[in-house]
């Protein structure tokens, strides 16, 4: 249970920590969840246990990251946090069901696809909070590591985060089953490439970019008005 809660809370942490590259923790943060889910899948009442633990973990993570909404909206804010936790919990439960039915490889493929689908659907819903998408949290204040977003969009970053987590989990799981790191060489190489190559491509794009066209100075002016009472 603790592994799942650690992942769920850790997923929301980068929103509150203004440190360089802290968002890269997301490339690993779901590994404890996947390990915890794998353990729970062998127990009785595994669906109920996974659902309840994930919901609690995500709710705690939401309180830590956007709990300040409670100061503005009172009870409605906490209802929103429940809604904000319930939707991803349902998608993770669906991953659990697919993995039980089709096996670990198809399950991990569905893990990536389902989370991307979740964030896409969430983007279409009028009531949402875009700041807690995996594709956003992974870079927070460091845009130099996601320059290729201009081609894939933020959901491309989400897919990158989930693929890295899935590959790392599969590597650790194989090591646990075989007891030998040598049997995991291919998985280790794939995991490292999935993490490092997009970073290198992005950094190369960032530092090789040159401004084109005529230079100009712009001034932004904002009216000093209270939007709640005057406009």
Image (cartoon, rainbow, N blue to C red):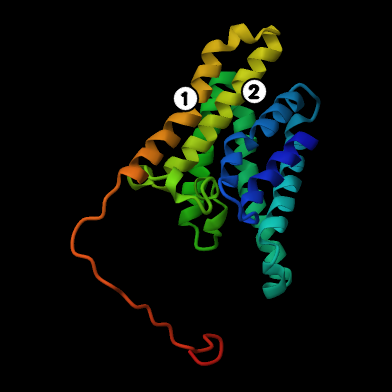
State the image quarter where residue 207 is shown. Answer: top left
State the image quarter where residue 27 is shown. Answer: top right
Which comes before the other along the chain, label 2 or label 1? 2
Q: Position of residue 226 (x, y in %)?
A: 54, 88
Instruction: Work out whether residue 211 or residue 177 is closer to the camera in this orientation and state it.
Output: 211
Q: CA distance from mark 2 to mark 1?
A: 28 Å
The residue where tag 2 is placed is 100
Q: Quadrant of the N terminus?
A: top right
Instruction: Work out whether residue 228 or residue 22 is closer to the camera in this orientation and state it.
Output: 22
Instruction: Work out whether residue 58 or residue 211 is closer to the camera in this orientation and state it.
Output: 211
Q: On screen, 23 above or below 175? A: below
Task: Tell me the element at label 2.
Answer: helix
Disc assigned to residue 193: 1
Which residue is found at the position 51% from the left and 50% from the top?
136
Q: On screen, 75 above or below 14? A: below
Q: Position of residue 43 (x, y in %)?
A: 80, 24
Q: Residues within 10 Å of mark 1 (few under 14, many from 20)?
A: few
Task: Tell me the element at label 1.
Answer: helix
Q: On screen, 166 above or below 119? A: above
Which residue is found at the position 48% from the left and 36% from the top?
160
| Residue 175 in sight | yes
Q: On screen, 125 above or below 88? A: below
Point out the residue furthest to the left here.
Answer: 213
Number of marks drawn? 2
Image-based side of 163 in relation to 77, left or right = left
| Residue 1 in sight | no
Q: Position of residue 135 (x, y in %)?
A: 50, 46
């Amino acid at each position: 249970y603790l592994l799942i809660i650690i992942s769920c809370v850790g997923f929301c942490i980068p929103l509150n920590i203004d440190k360089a590259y802290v968002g890269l923790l997301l490339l690993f943060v779901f590994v404890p969840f996947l390990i915890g889910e794998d353990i729970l899948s062998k127990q009785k009442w595994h669906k109920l246990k996974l659902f309840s633990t994930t919901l609690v973990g995500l709710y705690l993570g939401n309180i830590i990251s956007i709990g300040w909404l409670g100061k503005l909206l009172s009870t409605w804010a906490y209802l929103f946090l429940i809604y904000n936790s319930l939707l991803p919990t349902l998608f993770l439960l669906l991953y659990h069901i697919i993995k039980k039915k089709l096996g670990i490889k198809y399950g991990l493929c569905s893990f990536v696809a389902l989370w991307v689908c979740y964030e896409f659907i969430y983007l279409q819903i009028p009531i949402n909070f875009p700041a807690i998408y995996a594709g956003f949290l992974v870079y927070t204040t460091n845009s130099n590591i996601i320059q290729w977003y201009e081609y894939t969009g933020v959901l491309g970053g989400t897919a990158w985060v989930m693929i890295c987590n899935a590959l790392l989990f599969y590597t650790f799981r194989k090591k646990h089953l075989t007891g030998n790191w040598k049997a995991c060489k291919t998985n280790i190489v794939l995991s490292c490439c999935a993490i490092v190559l997009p970073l290198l491509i992005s950094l190369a794009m960032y530092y090789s970019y040159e401004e084109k066209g005529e230079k100009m100075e712009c001034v932004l002016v904002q009216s000093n008005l209270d939007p709640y009472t005057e406009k």
